[in-house]
Image (tube, coloured by chain):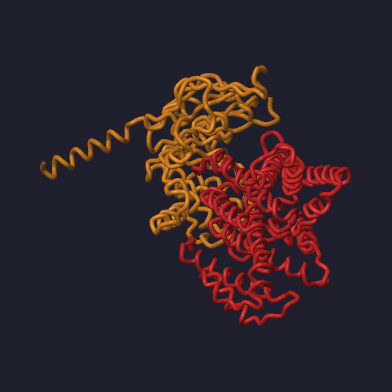
Amino acid sequence: MRPLTLRRLLLQCLILIVILFFVVIVALKFGAVPVSLYALGRDLLRVIFGQSSQISTDYGLIILNIRLPRILLGIIVGASLSVAGTSFQALLRNPLADPFVLGVSSGASLGAILALIAEPHLALSPVFSALLTPLGAFLGAAATIAAVYFLGRHEGQIDSTTLLLGGVITGSFLSAIIMFLMSTLTGSLRGITFWLMGDLSTPLQKSVYWFLGIGFFVAAGAIYTTASDLNLLLAGEKEAMHLGVDVPRVRLVVYIAASFLTGLAVSVSGVVGYVGLIVPHIMRFIFGSDHRTLLPTAAIGGAIAVVVADTLARTVVAPTEVPVGAVTAVIGAPLFIYLLRKRLT
Amino acid sequence: MTAASSHARHLAEASRLANEIRLSVEQVSYAHSANPGQAPLFTLEATSFQARPGEIVAILGPNASGKSTLLRLISGALAPLSGRILLDGFVTHSLTPRTRAQRIAVVQQESTLLFPARAWEFVLQGRHSHGRSLRFESEDDVLIAKNALAQVGAADLSDRWMDQISGGEKQRIILARALAQQPLLLLLDEPTLHLDIAAQVGLLDALRRLAAENRYTVVVVTHELNLAAEYADQIVLMQRGRCLRVGPPSSIYQRELLEQVFQTPLSVELGSSGRPRVTVLSGTQ
């Protein structure tokens, strides 16, 4: 018997954080201006410890203002999608659940696009109009997961095949609406292509990073408070209730927080698929299926995955960039098929 | 106060506790309909019985007689239409899920896992309701879980994966998890359903021993006439949503009554253990 201890949990997270650190250094290195890995490592530590003024100015601009923000965005998006995927898998008792597969990402993009279209007509103050897109994405995500949940529910039980099919169909229906909007609207094509393919290259204002970071920690923290409840929910709602889980409360918290995380990621990066599916599976394979470990390790793992995918997106056919969503789909879709086959046998 | 008088008080207290009614089902009824406003698809008519610590009650009846519904009502998962169910004076349905899980353990027909888990992880789940939501299992929890595994004779299964053990072994692990909850009331829904004869007897022997040792009140739903007769102190006989009779096996096991309830010719005689034995007379009229 080897129950989880705080020490082991922290150690596992620390290992992943060290890996993330090195991945970030390598990601910082790739680009038009060559910089040594050593210098990057040293300067990244300086940024982390708040001494960015000591960084040499000749390449500091590129590192701090161009490459690092994009990597930071990748970290937040990856962690959010991965935590959302882990939560949906537990909530829906379906190991193949993921914000993209369930159509939640498409719902979030549609919400974001509708918010973008509505924004000029609403005459809001700048602060509110900046929050309108994430809000639209959140509402789109929440509405989609609710719809998919009811589609997949049959006589009080969730049927996993119906649920997945419902998600895929809902996703393609919503994508069709996005396509429709795309062909009728002129001028905002760039923005909409971005939501279809998943992309991290759009620069954001500094305050948005704060919003994303705080939003992530609040939502992921809320989900983490239910971590041991989620372990029991895997055995079914009835059984979890008999073991002392307040099922409706846990379902509500996780449902809202995971939709929020999906909306958060989609509103700044578009549809980056399969991260929330593949990363939790890898982490479960390495660290086991206890959500007290799984949620934080999946968050860091998701960050690593998206930073790596985005680095590939920037470099495989440089100087042209591939959307990061295309990279995650090329890697993720075959892995999805593999998991599906493994489950069927 | 002298040691002798303290001891006497202690004994008096213990005997009072032993004779106290722990579970009291009072005129409980229930109706289930697919849609509100429609005629109910299923009804349970007013049912009453009581059980003391250490007692095994079997809810006996053919399929669709309302056995499992009655068990779910006792567990507090369903709210009765009328009447009430008290566990040590508390209405079971009104307790929070956490408090309920500290007092009532439910062993379901089977338990499916989405991702693989080891037996000890599974048993530790029984400790969930005894801690805060975000904490790590204490040494006490581990000790209680180990003890629970030992009590069902499954200490050697501790490190095995749940999907790689036999049905009988799995059932024992599920029972161990229920014991780890340290409940007052242990509810089992058809626990012997998928087990072979040896495993059935093993499980019920363990249950009888545990009920006596730990003073659990045990309520078992079953349609196995002979197992109920052998192990239960009290039988609640059900048919089509009605509780026909409550009493010790000797008063329930009468040929006409059982033939009428189970719709099959059978004979009842006294077994070697002094308990009734039922033989189903198939094909003879």
Q: Is residue B139 left or right of residue B262?
A: left
Q: Nearer the viewer, residue A125 or B147?
A: A125
Question: Which chain identifier belongs to the red chain?
Answer: A
Residue A59 against residue A167 in the figure, above or below:
below
Return the x and y of residue B98 as percentages of the image width and height.
46, 41
Location of residue B103 by image quarter: top left
Which residue is situated farthest in the left direction here?
B2
Q: Is residue A287 left or right of residue A150?
A: left
Count of numbered marks? 0
Return the x and y of residue B120 as percentages of the image width and height.
51, 57
Return the x and y of residue A322 as percentages of the image width and height.
81, 65
Q: Nearer the viewer, residue A33 or A24?
A: A33
Looking at the image, can residue A7 be seen?
yes
Looking at the image, can residue B260 be seen?
no
Residue B232 against residue A332 in the figure, above or below:
above
Return the x and y of residue B188 as percentages of the image width and height.
52, 39
